[in-house]
Amino acid sequence: MSQSNKNSKRTLSNVKDYPQKRTKTDTQGLNQFSIHPLARFNGPCSTYKQPVEIMSFSYDNERNLHMDDRELKYYYPPDLKDCNLSHGYETFVQREQCGPEPIHSLLDSLAYAQKSSTDKNLIKTDLVSWRGVFTKILCTPYNRNEPWELGATLWNNTIFIEEHETEYTKENSTGSTPRHKLMSYWGYKFENLSTISKLPSEITSPDDPELINRKTSIVNTNIQYCSVAKTSLGNNKLIMGAEVDCLSDVKPKRPGNPIVDKYIELKTSKIVESEKDTFNFEKYKLLKIWAQSFLIGIPKVIVGFRNNEGCVKSIKEFKTMDIPKIVKGKNGMWNATVCLNFANKFFEWLRTVIVVDDPNSSYTISFTSPFKDIKVEFMGKKNSVLAERHLDSLKST
């Protein structure tokens, strides 16, 4: 695995993955990208450029969108003597949006960034989506029991992708049962108990109002801070938006920086008490943690390990680039190189089968049982992922 500013060479090791480009009059068929054999994704790792932040934006407590950093928080370690993640659950405020997040606010931020920039190619790219979508694809070689479905629209030579809500996602959503809803709250509460609104260096006393207020503040999932980054995987240029939990120090104000190296990802996980717990944590949890953080360029992840009652008992820091070393060579584990090579070849293939350049049309990209292939189907003039306002504002892409 590597992050570099140099382009990597594409190799077509499996010709059947790269069919001749389809024409606009030949788009009704079903295209399939085979997952197996995984061995074909071994070998030299596809180059992944260090992501560069091109924009950031915030949602306030009423879900209003602001093209600024007003909701950016700083990490300050929680007090493990009083870290019950169930506290305040009765006042939990969840945003009204059900299902996966549409791509609209991300595209609004790109339009704003382009309008504010002198670089006419600032948002020129091959694929645009939320980090969560790219994470699903990156993890697919090893998550072959989790179905997903995406919608895609090609316009002006850019593929815009967003996640669809399915019966599976409804049944397995964080709010599908009282227990799931509570456990979802634990993650948000951990963020509340681990972040403050001012620089950590400005905290001079354990009685500082910032530290007191975060214990009693209402968890409101309308509030978000998002970073928008530009990068590339092999010859595939990507732009993604991602929610960022916090950072450790002052955010640099120089535009066009690599993604801020002080960003931090916060996670909670069940305490590891047995060999089975260790296996599950390393195979499933660490894979997703690595993929999410690596894609957007976040260098550090802080995990709060909690018991079954939701009380955090310990905290551990992981360097994102070191996570693949933890599982390397272990039986039944994942390989970061395979994930990146898989995603690289899939994106290359996807760009050969999504060919109808029409803002009013769409494709469905799906991965379902028996989990052997990713399928792409042209849906015609319906279910576009673009809103009307994007057609003029994103002309420069």
Image (cartoon, rainbow, N blue to C red):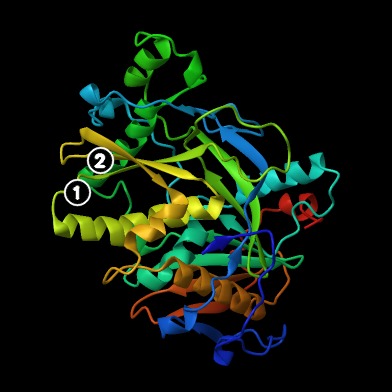
Check disc 2 and report its element: helix, strand or loop.
strand
- The image shows residue 137 at horizontal and vertical percentages of 48, 66
Residue sitting at x 58%, y 34%? 58
Instruction: Quadrant for residue 17, please give it.
Output: bottom right
Q: Taking the image as drawn, is residue 282 in sight?
A: yes
Relative to 258, residue 168 above or below = below
Contact check, label 1 and label 2, Cβ < 8 Å: yes
Numbered badge on residue 305: 2
Which amino acid type corresponds to the residue marked 2 in the rendered image?
Phe
| Identity of the residue furthest to the left in this view | 274
Q: Residues within 10 Å of mark 1 (few under 14, many from 20)?
A: some
Residue 89 position in % (x across, y down): 27, 29
From the viewer's perspective, is residue 78 above or below residue 337?
above
Query: Which mark is on residue 32?
Result: none
Whole-angstrom CA distance, mark 1 to mark 2, is 8 Å
Q: State the mark number for residue 272.
A: 1
331 to the left or right of 224: left
The amino acid marked with disc number 1 is Val
| Residue found at x 27% / y 71% | 332
Q: For mark 2, does the 10 Å Cα neighbourhood hold few (<14), some (14 to 19), or many (20 or more) residues?
A: some
Q: Does residue 100 appear anywhere in the picture?
A: no
Q: Position of residue 47 (x, y in %)?
A: 60, 66
Foreground of the two, 378 or 3: 3
